[in-house]
Image: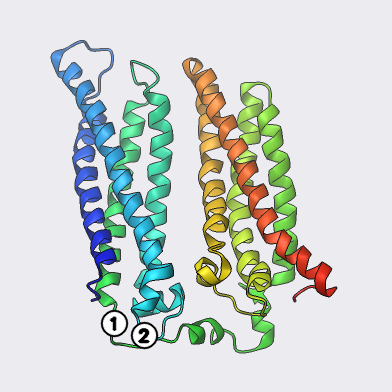
Amino acid sequence: MIRHPLLMAVLVGDLISLLLLLAAAKTALKTVTEWAPQSASGRQIGLERAVETGELTAKFALAAFLTSTLLLLAGITNVLPGVIPGAMCGTGVLQAAHGLGGSALFCRFLTLGIIYLWLVLEKLNSLQPDRPFAVGSARVLLLVVPFDVLAVSTTLQAVWQMDAHQPVDCCAVVYDQFQSLAMARQTAGIPNSLWLMAFWLLSILMLFSGLCALRAAGASGRVKISGWLALLALLWVPAAAVVLIKVFAAYYYQVLHHHCPWCLFLPDHKFVGIPLFFSLAVVVLEGPAAFITARIAAQYPQFIHSATRRSQIAGLRILLAAAAFIGMVSLPALLWRLQYGVWLH
């Protein structure tokens, strides 16, 4: 185990977030079993006060977990490579975790995604004094608990596996995954050229759907177009990640077949991985949020204005994030083409 102050801060933040989340989940469980908005009893009034306290506690848990996740990403990308012998980027750090690092990050991102959807529901719910989504919001919060426990435990195991004395070879991890040049030109058995075509097709469809979602009239029309937008967003993000790593990253690295996403976070490449992957995160979070809030606006008349506006904001964020991503990956390729007259492929 590497006793680095940053890793210790991550583990402390995880512990704080887990304790706060468990406290909020206790109130959420009572809400699911005892919530009676039509009642004016002292028990219901006390539960309503507890729900407000639980909401605040859950938000503090989210802040602590998000902070520890950002610290962990900072450590993987730019701090721990200088501690682990042989590591030059995050690939070497994950190699030192013996396969648990990737699992820990996946669990953390999944947990953050569920918490974000809870936050969207809770913000709408707090606009009404009777809190019509109290039970549904509490169920989503309870769903966060097992994923948070899994994320925290997997992160602890990954940190425990890291050894500052055992050398790694992150370049070997990147290049040894391909047995031939043909394998380097495909992903999941699909040629990278087809991934690129799918990316541009999905980009056009998603941008068009986003514009339609901003101008959609009628509750049913908004639900339908936001549903398509959410589906396209969830399909677009994997395609965008594949073409970023397998096609467009070459224009940043200026070398072919260096399929390493972590090197994009290094200072040598101006930390370009931060805005690129942040854009992908915005799209994958706001897609479901646009659909869920559109459904709420259609089914609950009291939320027609607030939920419709939130759905439109989600659509606008998707448009801006997707446009930013497309611009950031396209510009280096176009400049290379103008300067050398060829594409890197």
Local secondary structure at mark 1: loop
Q: Which residue is at a point 74% across and 66% down the rendered structure image?
A: 333
Viewer-proximal residue among 294 and 327: 327
Local secondary structure at mark 2: loop
Res. 185 image quadrant: bottom right
Left or right of residue 179: residue 299: left
In the orientation shown, which residue stands out farthest toward the left?
Answer: 42
Res. 91 image quadrant: bottom left
Image mark for residue 85:
2
Q: Mark 1: few, some, or many residues within 10 Å (few <14, many ≥20)?
A: some
For the residues marked 1 and 2, what is the alpha-carbon distance in whole angstroms? 7 Å
Going by the numbered disc 1, the residue's amino acid type is Ala
**Image coords of residue 313 (percent x, y):** 57, 32
Contact, mark 1 vs mark 2 (Cβ under 8 Å)? yes
Left or right of residue 267: residue 105: left
Q: Mark 2: few, some, or many residues within 10 Å (few <14, many ≥20)?
A: some
In this view, 340 is above or below 299 = below
Res. 41 image quadrant: top left
- Asked whether residue 99 is in view, the answer is no
Name the N-terminal-most of marks 1 and 2.
2
Going by the numbered disc 2, the residue's amino acid type is Pro
Quarter occupied by the C terminus: bottom right
- Asked whether residue 93 is in view, the answer is yes
Viewer-proximal residue among 308 and 32: 308
**Image coords of residue 104 (percent x, y):** 35, 64
**Image coords of residue 307 (percent x, y):** 51, 25
Mark 1, residue position:
164
